[in-house]
Image (cartoon, rainbow, N blue to C red):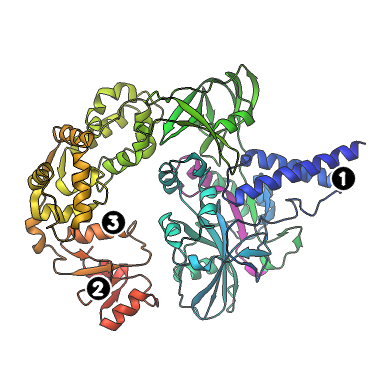
């Protein structure tokens, strides 16, 4: 009877873990934390060893899960096996023996397998279940760190991880208004992104690739370090790595762990990996279960948990979604003091069983994100607010048709919290350039009632005493923010116009308008309704957009109030023709390595008097493309017209950037 109970528990664990894996690999809502998954996986492994009862679909026997997406399924040339895992330094040292090993990150993204033949990328497969994966080769130009062409002309297979940084994750997630479409973490976002059919949308999300294994090459390289060096020379992104011996592992693991705890590591990781420098020795190991014994050993951090008492639940509105945050008695976790953790949504609160009074078990997931993983004691019912904390309109509980997730929403379409995108653009480098105001900070200030209009940024100093008491702030933060705000009071007209969030009007349009009318003329034309159709490159649609925006009373009032706070200059328009790049016209295409994105490079070129266009014509001076050998339409057109194609590095060298 006892054996049957254990078998029943095994079936239950397999079912729950597989449902969680399906969500995890499919970019859906998380079903459980890594903390919970690891605990259940360890329990399952123990029961399987004890009873000998192992189901074919058990996660201990499989290397992954079939990802969602519309791509064709294909068999891997070489199975993508899992790595054995440990949480003990001693086991890492025992595995390393007396041999040289490399320490690397266990990146938390989506594993991809790249195949090259005759110097060209021929295939990208997702890991899938380790035996078959999804073909996503059409995304080859959308993922950073994957060269489309390489110098090596033999057969090459490379395995690595596609990830999205925490910075880009927060920027994107905070701009998603529908809570059902938000992502739980960067890994969840990367998985969901690579299942999209829109290559341009994937590119916008800044997915990066880092190789960690050279699976196959015609010319043998018997050194893992040599393999990584080879891949770097071929312009692959590779995982960070450090060579050492067993007796150095404890210090190195502590040092690398500190990088994560301090926030220095922007890429999502869920552990570390060691692998042998001698790849011939590594390839000689046996294959046990679903991993190769010598392929590598993964180290996962022990999740340090702490019990604490819930003080209250804070409800924070972003866009139309009102999300719960647990505020509890401060506890020490991973070297820092933690007093808050997101509860995600109403469904997660119900799953945890959190009441008005509760004792919580909290961790820092992957050493970074505070997370409530268990409620050990609870009493009373949690009160769901009936009013929005920002505008005090009625709230509404919505249930997702796809996931069944319950979320709380503000019913007021004019709620100021819906304008976080506008405020983010207002303070951006292209706008008022107020440093130190992240999306999360802006949302916090909005929920506290500090920000309702643009001009409120210039009165934040009246709230500094209260801001200094907030988590993550202090007197120094307030002083730095005050300095940045004062600096932004001197603004160029083009940046102010961009900051106003006028539909269809970006920096390019603003520059064209100011070059012809000046800022005073811009104001006069809006007031008189004359419009801007006579300005080259503006046209009726953009002109009407400006006039329509200004005719909205709240916009006109907001602009008037803002102009009382700042001093606007037309900029140095008259000196542009004498600038270093005056007379040159550039077209930018492909991925960039030094500049953050094309917009940043384009803005620099224009600041030096140059011009940027979207298509190659006879008037083009240079096509900037890091993939000079590409057979893209722009490269072909440039060659036809005899226009020089230069790399980003050549551009920087030639023009002294």
Question: Percent x, y for residue 427?
Answer: 27, 41
Name the residue beneath numbered marker 2: 622
Q: Which residue lies furthest to the right in this view?
A: 1
Q: How crowded is mark 1: few (under 14 residues within 10 Å), some or many (20 or more)?
A: few
Please tell me how crowded label 3 is: few (under 14), some (14-19), or many (20+) other residues with Cα within 10 Å.
few
Q: Quadrant of residue 465?
A: top left
**What kind of element bears circle 3?**
helix
| Crowding near the residue tagged with mark 2, few <14, some 14–19, many ≥20 C-alpha atoms within 10 Å | many
Indicate whether 446 appears above or below 95: above
Label 1 vs label 3: CA separation? Answer: 60 Å
Whether label 1 touches label 3, CB < 8 Å: no
Position above or below: 446 against 582: above
- For image coordinates 51% across by 37% down, the residue present is 369
Say which residue appears at 45% left-offset and 42% top-offset.
Answer: 263
What residue sits right under mark 1 in the picture?
A: 51
Q: Are marks 1 and 2 in contact (CB under 8 Å)?
A: no
Front position in the image: 272 or 408: 408
The span picked out in magenta is 255-280
- Residue 11 coordinates in the image, percent (x, y): 80, 44
Q: Which of marks 1 and 3 is in front?
A: 3
Instruction: Name the residue tied to disc 3.
Output: 600
Q: Is residue 249 above or below residue 312?
A: below
Task: Tell whether 430 sits left or right of 254.
Answer: left
Q: Going by the image, does 571 lie left or right of 157?
A: left
Q: In which quarter of the image is the C terminus?
A: bottom left
């Amino acid at each position: 009877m006892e054996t049957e109970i254990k078998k029943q528990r095994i079936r239950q664990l397999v079912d729950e873990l597989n449902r969680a894996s399906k969500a995890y690999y499919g970019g859906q809502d998380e079903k459980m934390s890594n903390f919970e998954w690891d605990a259940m996986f360890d329990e399952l492994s123990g029961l399987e060893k004890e009873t000998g009862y192992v189901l074919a679909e058990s996660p201990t026997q499989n290397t992954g899960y079939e990802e969602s997406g519309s791509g064709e399924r294909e068999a891997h040339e070489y199975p993508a096996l899992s790595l054995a895992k440990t949480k003990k330094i001693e086991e890492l040292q025992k595995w390393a023996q007396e041999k040289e090993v490399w320490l690397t990150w266990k990146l938390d993204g989506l594993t991809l397998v790249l195949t090259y033949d005759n110097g060209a990328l021929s295939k990208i497969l997702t890991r899938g279940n380790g035996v078959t994966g999804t073909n996503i080769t059409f995304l080859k130009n959308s993922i950073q760190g994957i060269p489309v062409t390489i110098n090596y002309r033999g057969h090459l297979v490379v395995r690595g991880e596609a990830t999205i940084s925490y910075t880009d994750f927060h920027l994107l997630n905070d701009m998603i208004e529908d809570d059902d479409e938000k992502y739980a973490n960067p890994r969840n976002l990367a998985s969901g992104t690579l299942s999209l059919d829109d290559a341009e949308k994937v590119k916008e999300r800044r997915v990066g690739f880092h190789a960690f294994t050279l699976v196959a090459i015609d010319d043998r390289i018997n050194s893992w370090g040599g393999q990584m060096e080879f891949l770097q020379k071929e312009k692959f992104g590779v995982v960070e790595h450090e060579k050492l011996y067993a007796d150095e592992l404890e210090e190195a693991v502590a040092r690398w762990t500190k990088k994560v705890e301090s926030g220095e590591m922007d890429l999502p990781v869920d552990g570390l990996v060691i692998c042998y420098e001698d790849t011939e020795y590594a390839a000689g190991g046996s294959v046990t279960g679903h991993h190769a014994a010598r392929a590598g050993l993964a180290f996962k951090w022990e999740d340090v948990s702490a019990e604490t008492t819930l003080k209250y639940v804070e409800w924070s509105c972003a866009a139309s979604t009102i999300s719960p945050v647990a505020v509890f008695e401060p506890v020490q976790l991973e070297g820092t003091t933690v007093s808050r953790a997101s509860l995600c949504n109403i469904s997660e609160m119900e799953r945890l069983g959190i009441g008005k009074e509760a004792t919580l078990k909290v961790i820092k997931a992957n050493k970074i994100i505070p997370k409530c993983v268990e409620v050990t004691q609870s009493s009373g019912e949690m009160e769901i607010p009936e009013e929005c904390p920002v505008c005090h309109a009625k709230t509404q509980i919505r249930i997702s048709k796809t996931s069944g997730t319950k979320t709380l929403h503000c019913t007021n379409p004019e709620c100021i919290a819906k304008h976080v995108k506008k405020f983010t653009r207002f303070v951006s480098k292209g706008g008022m350039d107020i440093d130190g105001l992240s999306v999360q900070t802006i949302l916090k200030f909005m929920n506290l009632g500090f920000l309702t209009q643009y001009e409120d940024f210039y009165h934040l100093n009246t709230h500094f005493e209260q801001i200094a008491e907030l988590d993550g702030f202090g007197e120094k933060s307030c002083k730095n923010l005050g300095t940045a705000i004062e600096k932004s009071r001197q603004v160029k007209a083009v940046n102010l116009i961009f900051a106003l969030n006028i539909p269809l009007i970006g920096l390019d349009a603003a520059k064209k308008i100011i070059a012809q009318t000046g800022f005073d003329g811009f104001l006069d034309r809006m007031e008189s309704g004359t419009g801007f159709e006579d300005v080259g490159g503006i046209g009726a649609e953009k002109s009407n957009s400006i006039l329509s925006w200004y005719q909205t009373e709240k916009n006109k009032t907001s602009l008037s109030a803002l102009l009382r706070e700042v001093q606007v200059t037309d900029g140095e328009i008259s000196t542009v023709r004498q600038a270093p790049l005056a007379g040159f016209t550039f077209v930018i295409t492909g991925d960039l390595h030094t500049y953050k994105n094309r917009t940043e490079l384009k803005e620099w070129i224009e600041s030096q008097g140059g011009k940027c266009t979207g298509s190659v014509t006879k008037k083009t001076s240079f096509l900037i493309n890091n993939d000079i050998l590409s057979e893209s339409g722009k490269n072909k057109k440039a060659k036809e017209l005899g226009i020089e194609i230069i790399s980003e590095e050549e551009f920087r060298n030639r023009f002294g950037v």
